[in-house]
Every structure is written in C-alpha cells, then in structure tokens.
Amino acid sequence: MSKEVLLKIEDLKVNINNNEILKGLNLEIKPGEIHALMGVNGAGKSTLVKTLAAHYDCEVTGGKVTFKNKDLLEMDVSTRANEGIFMSFQSPVEVPGVNNSYFLRTAMNAKRAYEGKEELDAMQFLKLVKEETNKFDIDRKLLQRDLNDGFSGGEKKRNELVQLLMLNPDLIMLDEIDSGLDVDAIKIVANVINSMLDGKKSILMITHYDRLLELIKPDFVHILSDGKIAKTGDYSLALELDEKGFEALGINNANS
Ligand SMILES: Nc1ncnc2c1ncn2[C@@H]1O[C@H](COP(=O)(O)OP(=O)(O)OP(=O)(O)O)[C@@H](O)[C@H]1O
C-alpha cells in the first residue's frame, strides 16, 4: 500500500433515483488525517459517505475510488468493512430479532477471519467489550437488546461508538454523529474518537456545527456544493462558515 494515500476519490459521479447527486467529486485522504465535510442541506454529503459504504441507494455512474490502493468500488459491503472502513449512519437502522451483542461479535469475527486472526468466543468478546467501554462512560446494557431496536437517538449513537471501538477501523466516517446528542454525549463521542487517533487512522466527518470540530480538530474542512468539493481550507474555514454562512462564502444554496 502506498504510504501517502489511504482513500483517493477521482471524478466520482453518483446517481440516486436517476438524479445526479455527485458530479465529479475529487478527494484524497492520507493516513492520520481528519477531514470535515460541510455543506448546505441536500448538497450530497451523506450520498458521498453512503457511496463509500456501498449503500444500495447510490448508483456510481463514473469515476474511481481507491482504498489502500485497491479498487473500492469493486468491493462488496462486507469486504469494505473488513478492509477497515466504518460508517456511522445518520439514522442507524433498527433490526428487531438480531441481538446487538451477537451482531457485533459476528462483525468482529468476520474482520478477524479476514485478517487471518482467530475468532473470539463469547467470553473473550465480553472481556474485550468491558475493557473498551470501561474507558468511557458507555453503558453496556444496550448490548443485551436487539440491534438499535427501540433505542433512543442518543443510544443509537452510543452503540455506534461501541462498534467503532471494537472494530477498530482505518477510516472512520461519521455522518452527523453530533445531531441530537446532548453536550455530555458529544464529549463522549469526541473522547472516543480522539482516543482512537494513532496517527494512522483517518476520519471523514460530516457536521453542520462547529461544536464537534472544536473537540475533534480537523486538518481539512471541505464544503460540498453542487455535487463537488467547492472549497477546501483548514479549521478556520469552519469558523468563517459559522460566522458568515454559506452565501457569503460564494456557496450555492441549491443542489441543481
Ligand atoms: N433515497 C432517496 N431517494 C431520492 N432522493 C434521495 C434519496 N436519498 C437522497 N436523496 C436526495 O439526494 C440529495 C442529496 O442528499 P444527501 O442526503 O446526500 O444530502 P446532505 O448533504 O447529506 O444533506 P443534509 O445536510 O440535509 O443531511 C438530496 O436532494 C436528497 O433529497
């Protein structure tokens, strides 16, 4: 693998329901970098991360994406996860009938098998979960329930943090993980993410608010508009955006 680039997106075009949402997007993420993605509602931010996570809504019509120098678009959803891509969804789906703990252990064991490691039995798994969640104020009771079934918005996000800690991915994609969270919960999110940063893990996070970026400082801030990255800067771009709004920065309000 090239040491310089973890994820490379070139001229990516994506349709949803036959509408072109991404119109030739380019983005490069190196190991250890934190990228924030901002933009008006409907600009296509979620579409980008959903496409990278192989979501069935997103039809790639052009372009190239490489992850660890491999063709990402050729990989199915589980291969992408096993290769080290993790996505935290804006609204994680509820899966009644599937035990949360069982689901997570299965996902971990699939990744371990892919990496040539031994599978974890239930006891080893629980020990690991306990070690990881004890470092943070994360309630383990959610693991006994069915996956996201009846979880509150905040509980769903906390559950994703447990998944994140256990799966230990190389690229963490967070789609508005701060939305609907109370101040303490946002701090837990930031603590978990910051604790995972080891100079190699990269982050692509979508947010509308400077609050999260204050706690997880991005190296790059991108503004998505009209299906492309319209502007890139450092953290000061997020501050400028917060102060002046999109229009003052010359960003179109429509995704047409
Ligand atoms: N399943 C779908 N069917 C039809 N249109 C869709 C679907 N999913 C997304 N879209 C459309 O694609 C466009 C981009 O949506 P996307 O969710 O990527 O925007 P976003 O930048 O993440 O917005 P927000 O900031 O509001 O979360 C929007 O116009 C949206 O209505």
Image (cartoon, helix red, strand yellow):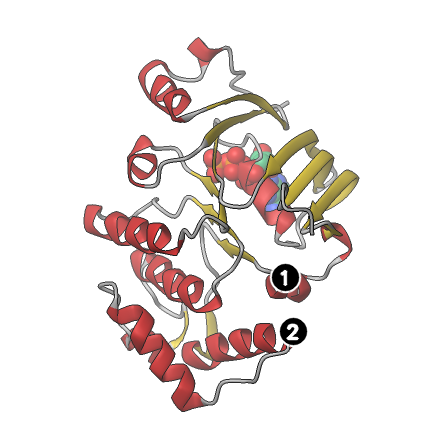
The disc placed on residue 45 is none
Task: Name the residue: 34% across, 50% down.
Answer: 194
The picture places residue 42, in percent across and down from the top left corner, at 53, 32
- Location of residue 111 by image quarter: bottom right
Residue 121, placed above or below residue 48: below
Q: Position of residue 200 (x, y in %)?
A: 50, 50
Amino acid type at mark 2: Tyr
Task: Residue at 55%, 30% (x, y): give it.
Answer: 43
Q: Dividing the image into four quarters, tell me where ligand 1 lies.
A: top right
The secondary element bearing badge 2 is classed as helix
Image coordinates for residue 135, horizontal then vertical, percent = 25, 66
Q: CA distance from mark 2 to mark 1?
A: 8 Å
Tell me if residue 222 comes above or below residue 82 in the rendering: above
Task: Return the residue at label 2.
Answer: 114
Q: Nearer the viewer, residue 3 or 211?
A: 3
**Point 30% across, 75% down: residue:** 131
Amino acid type for the residue under numbered disc 1: Glu
> Is 27 situated left or right of 243 in this image?
right
Q: Residues within 10 Å of mark 1 (few under 14, many from 20)?
A: many
Give the farthest residue toward the left: 184
- Asked if residue 98 is positioned above or below residue 122 in the image, the reply reads above
User: Which label is found at residue 83?
Assistant: 1
Check contact, mark 2 vs mark 1: CB within 8 A: yes
Ligand 1 under 8 Å from disc 2 Cβ? no
Disc on the earlier residue, 2 or 1: 1
Residue nearest the viewer, comparing 228 with 214: 214
Q: Is residue 228 left or right of residue 108?
A: right
Which is more toward the observer, 212 or 29?
29
